[in-house]
Amino acid sequence: MGPVGKCTNLATIFVQLTRKDRIRMRVVDLLLERSLQLLLQTPSSETRLATELSGCAPTELMDPTPFLDPAALLLTSGIGMNFSDERTWDAFVERLVDVPVSAIVFATGMAHHVLPPGLIAACTRRDVPLLEVPAAVPPLQVDRFIESVMQAERLAVVNRGWSLADECARLANQDAEIVTLLATVYNVVQSPLAVYDAYGTVIAQYPALATWTSGIRTKPQAGVLSIPLPMGLNNPCRLAIRDRDSDNPLASLLGPVASIIALQLNRSVSVDASWQQEIKSFVLACESWEEATHLDVRRAFQDIGLDPRVAASVLVADMSGEFASTSWQLRVALHEKFHTVRVTEFADRLVAFTQNSREDFDAVAERLLQIHDRQPLVLTTATLSLFELRLSVVHSLQLVQRIDRPQLAPALGLSAVVSATAGRGAKEAARKLLAPLREHDSKRDGPLLQTLRTYLDNDAQPSKTCSALFIHRNSLNYRLRKIETLLRLNLNSVEGQATCLFALRLVDVADQ
């Protein structure tokens, strides 16, 4: 923007510089205040006149820079500055530019009847607005005016903050998800926001297309204001906002609403925690095929506050090691996508039961399966049958141990079917079938049982089996023929492989 002369219409400039989100008082605001009668004595750019004041600093020191905050307004009457050398004035202004100050307000009539020409020249060269206080206006009046206006501005920010918090509290009471709260805040601050968990992972953000850096933040990030959420945790989640202007009072504005966001995050966890024992009991009932009847499972399902007449989905995720950092993300995503959520963690597993999806299943699956591309996680489609749900629970708990990435569970799992049909007779028959291999291995210290298990685990592919066992192809062929002889079945047939696979799974269930 070009320079603005002393005779330019300041009201027009003010309109050009005003924004609807303007918070702090600016240099141009002082010029428009008639009671102060300030006169702009330098051609100053619109950018400099738009500078927001951080405060007023009355001083008569030759070098007040150690006591000045950036964007402070310097107010002086020049007592002790009785020199005419322009170089001295230039050095004085140069030090103030390094702070930098927003403007210099010089009171005439006390030590100086008119503005020193050297000061005017120095301010003009360095584009520092120089405002003259006429002798009829006490300099203290300028200081009091600035303080009163800034106090009113601080109060206005606090009021805006509480109004925003009230709106977010109203939405939270209507079971709004975290993203909805962030969108409400965004409409006020017009800057992207995100919530980080204790591991430095983004668990919610708005807008969705905004890019945020993941990872633990040990130092402040340039251009980002980070506010700890009061959650009662040693390592709380944090609210992050893109802060284009480090001088604006976003921390004061967002303080109250941060508490609402923290309460909403804690709400989901406290609700989940209140069902922890009931969820574990339901999972145990699902796995206890011989001890728990269908009526027991139905009662356990109702004990966790779910409706047997409504379709339910299951999610099981591995939370060990590095995957522990996804806990908040999964919980937030579950509460975003479902009206009813029951989730807990035990034995390094996150187990969730959901009902009443907010979106179609494809959208839900896309959100949950993309949280961590290497996390073992199983999601099942919704089912209205408790018989099928029971199978889904057992299958998901077993499947999550054998995968290395998120996936949708197939409609039917062999392990779950084996568990469901693993009566006493089936288990005894399985032990009897495999007994010749156990006897052979114990007498000859041979690995026939291990070979059979490895062969089937590798989809009956000889090359993969040899690699897993570190043996030659001829050794594998010899062992397989020996197994066929002892078990009296054909391992080259689907029926023979299926029989052995069922037997191994039944023995595993019996040994658990």
Image: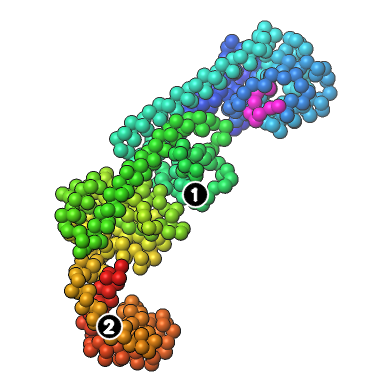
Mark drawn on residue 435: 2
Farthest residue toward the front? Answer: 443
Task: State the extent of the magenta-drawn residues as a range.
Answer: 67-74
Name which residue lies at 58% across and 27% down: 52
Position of 325 relative to 257 (above/below): below
| Residue at the disc numbered 1 | 200
Image coords of residue 99 (percent x, y) = 69, 31
The answer to whether residue 123 of the structure is visible from this angle is yes
Q: Quadrant of the N terminus?
A: top right
Q: Quadrant of residue 283?
A: bottom left
Seen from the viewer's position, the closer of residues 341 and 144 is 341
Give the secondary structure at mark 1: loop
- Residue type marked 1: Gly
- Residue type marked 2: Ala
Name which residue lies at 42% across and 26% down: 162
Mark drawn on residue 178: none
Q: Quadrant of residue 127?
A: top right
Lower position in the chain sequence, tag 1 or tag 2: 1
Seen from the viewer's position, the closer of residues 439 and 140 is 439
Q: Residues within 10 Å of mark 2 (few under 14, many from 20)?
A: some
Q: Residues within 10 Å of mark 1 (few under 14, many from 20)?
A: some
Q: Quadrant of the C terminus?
A: bottom left
Residues tagged 1 and 2 counted as in contact (Cβ below 8 A): no
Image coords of residue 463 (percent x, y) = 38, 84
Looking at the image, how many numbered discs can be counted on the residues? 2
Position of 438 relative to 99 (above/below): below
Image coords of residue 406 (percent x, y) = 36, 61
Colour scheme? rainbow
